[in-house]
Image (cartoon, rainbow, N blue to C red):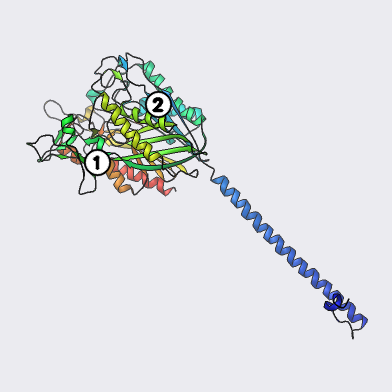
Amino acid sequence: MRAICADLPDFTGLAAGGQLEYLENARLNMESANMRRYVSLKSAASVLTILVFNHFFCLAGQAALKGGCAKVNITPPLGIPLIGSYGKPSNDILDELHAKALVLNDGNNTIAIVSADLLYTPLEEITAPARRIIKEKTGIPEEHILICATHTHSGPEVFARSKLRPDQEIPPSKIDQYYLQTLIRKIADAAVLAHKNMRGAKIGAAKGRIPEIVFNRRVKTPDGSAVMTWRVTAEIAATREIKTCPDGSTAVSFTLDANEPNLTFGPIDPEVWVLRVEDANNNIVGSIVNFACHPVCVYPYLPTAISADFPGDAADLVEQTEGGVCLFALGTAGDIVPYQRGVKAHKQVGRALGAEALRRLQFVSASDQATLDAVKKEVNFPVKKLVSADGEKKADKVAEYITTEMQILRLGDVYILGLPGEVLAEVGLEIKKKAGIEKLLVISLSNDAIGYVCHSRAYEEGGYEPGSGTNLEKRAGEIMINQALGLISQIKQGE
């Protein structure tokens, strides 16, 4: 009893009134302490509620990525002339052609990339009408849709070539309009199906190298002029040497003539970029392989045979081995060709490229928290002036500019730059050098066909690309470089 009462106050010596006053003060002090504890607990609960709300609100604003892929067969019927058949009807199918699409959504924005086994995807004839169908059926904004060609030279001739040299235009009456309209719908179908197939996804990119399968066909003589070297024999191919140039670029050279040892081979872009899209269980949904080399193994050896050329073999190997849908996206390959050509080389080059892509796809670090964005810009390129037989320029006979577009997509830390036309390697390398981006995929022949895009020095060197290969004036390459860097800067500001 003494132990229990030890902490009670000693009332001895206090009058009854004093004892009551003491007890009342004690009661008030206890209520005040309880109130302070209540307020503290309530404040802590409020702070916790705010923190939890903010946590879930932020998660909702950063919705996990979704992605889907699809492919649609676009092989034309036999009888349609091919790009490399010189007007002759096609009479064989070496391998089928496809349109392949990747669609991604981050909860706020959706982008679509479509790659078609065609020589070109001209803006007015194919890209714009396909975009309109995709937007109508999926709601994806047209500026968020990139449509590119693999550039196979064994595909159908279905283009008016309105932005190439005037003497290269084809009247619409000579184009199979029924197949063209079917082709446009099938290209759109690939994106629509990919959109329908979207599910939780993760993406990531990695870079490889494969310089040994290509070379720059613009070979320079000691006087600085360019000599076009379209192909090399097996004997010459055996003299191949891969060099690192003083400026850090890579060149592949051959001994073309023992009596002419001072020939210089231009740079190549040896990079193989791969984009991996996988589901929540790390199974691959799709991929993109980006590499710079003209798909001209089959052409002109089988000029009337339909083929996706080596990009088809590379994509087939990835799909058969790893799974998913594999899109091929051409790099800046305007002056880059395979070191060997022919039907056998078509398989060898494709499998070599596909094997390098498979190697890099194994070690991609993927994330489902990539923010998506896209910017598209109209660009004008000045064109050459026509010259009459007496040497006078006929400025009134041709438009002053060609109007086209350039596009940039951002997929988290991966950037995809879409360039129109057949862009020389030197132009693409300069963009990569100045862009300041680690993961940059440059895709030529995106959204339009405007002929060859050459740097100014190429016009001084001569050769096919700046000559009969283009309708663009001398400064076209520099315009493209500046516009591309501006687009990259613009989309980075929105990060």
**Spatial separation of the CA atoms under disc 2 and disc 1:** 29 Å
Image coords of residue 417 (percent x, y): 36, 40
Q: Do the residues labelled 2 and 1 touch (CB within 8 Å)?
A: no
Instruction: Note whether 286 is above or below 205 in the view shown.
Output: above
**Mark 2 or mark 1: which comes first in sequence?**
2
Q: Mark 2 points at which residue?
A: 99
Instruction: Note whether 247 is above or below 235 in the view shown.
Output: below
Q: Nearer the viewer, residue 284 or 440?
A: 284
Inspect the image, locate mark 2, and give the three-letter code of the amino acid beneath it: Ala
Instruction: Write the residue at 87% across / 78% down.
Output: 2
Q: Mark 1 points at which residue?
A: 426
Residue 388 falls left or right of residue 194: left
Q: Residue furthest right?
A: 16
Location of residue 122 (image quadrant) = top left
Image coords of residue 136 (percent x, y): 49, 28
Location of residue 253 (image quadrant) = top left
Instruction: Note whether 182 is above or below 467 in the view shown.
Output: above
Answer few, some or many: residues within 10 Å of disc 2's Cα (few below 14, many 20 plus, some between 14 and 19).
many
Q: Under tag 2, what secondary structure?
A: strand
Image coords of residue 281 (percent x, y): 52, 38
Residue 247 seen: yes
Inspect the image, locate mark 1, and give the three-letter code of the amino acid beneath it: Glu
